[in-house]
Image (spheres, helix red, strand yellow):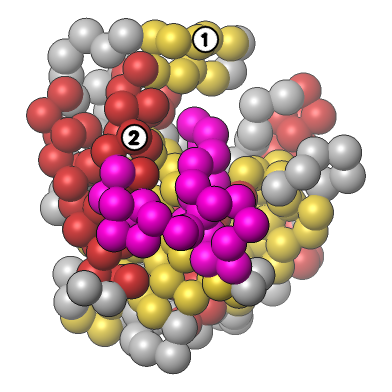
Amino acid sequence: MTDLELATHAALTAGKLLRQHFGSDAVVDEASHHDIKLALDKESQELITEILLGANPGDALYGEEGIAGNQASERQWIVDPIDGTVNFFYGIPHFCVSIALRVNGEIVVGVIHDPMVGETWTVEKGGPALLNGSPIQASKRDTFEQSILFVGCGKDEESLRTGIERFHKASLRARKMRMMGSAALGMAYIACGRLDAYIESRISLWDIAAGQLLVETAGGKVELTAVPGHPDAWSIVASNGRIPVEEIL
């Protein structure tokens, strides 16, 4: 089984678990003003870890719910077991599993799986970006007046303020704005032309690792800026490569 096949298998297996539990009472492990952690987040990551490290026990795994494996390995799986946990908890069927493989610091495999819609985006460095096995590409829209933009607002006061300011500024120019609750799906939607850009001032690596390779392979552009004082947190500007996103930053 190739790395891409393995990642896809892990994402589909975890997605089946999430779909089985969707709509039932979920156990909350941790709750803050703007976020929720579920016991199912951990269960999903444990399942993914068992599959990935079971096949490659020498690999490292870095996920939202912790690390596993050999952290000195040049091969590191980057996992978000439920991207869109708050959506899941409230019964909103917009969430996904995101898995990427980073080798020597470079993302080489990405899988994003939406278990509710039954869509799976896959990409391997040097190969095409695919949605359910069919090639995809970012949109060719090049004006704000045609575009649909996704602005994330983060979880802390500063990122919330920045996101709301950007949302307001962009809404005066774009055709439509969206706040969707899943960064990984937002990037997958850019890769297949449904959205034209995604902006957020602070997002974690596991949310965007698979999506970065997917967007760039589909002809889009991703710019990441490290957030000082927050390891593996990034400011992100992802787009189809045509919309002049810098004008609304």
Magenta highlight range: 50-78
- Kindly identify the residue that appears in the image at 49 percent across and 42 percent down: 68
Q: Which label number is shown at residue 182?
A: none
The residue carrying pointer 2 sits among few (fewer than 14), some (14 to 19) or many (20 or more) residues within 10 Å by Cα, namely: some
- Residue 60 on the magenta segment: yes
What residue did someone put label 2 on? 46
Q: Is residue 66 magenta?
A: yes
Residue at image location 18% in from the left, 25% down from the top:
22
Dividing the picture into quadrants, the one containing residue 229 is top right
Position in image of residue 72 (x %, y %): 64, 57
On the image, numbered disc 1 is attached to which residue? 31
77 over 64 or under it: above or below: below
Q: Amino acid at mark 1?
A: Ala
Q: Residues within 10 Å of mark 1 (few under 14, many from 20)?
A: few
| Label whose residue precedes the other's in the sequence (1 or 2) | 1
Residue 176 place in picture, x, y as percent: 48, 52
Q: Residue at x 33, y 71 (%)?
A: 3
Q: Quadrant of the C terminus?
A: bottom right
- Give, as a three-letter code, the residue at label 2: Glu
Q: In the image shown, does 241 or 88 lie closer to the viewer?
A: 88
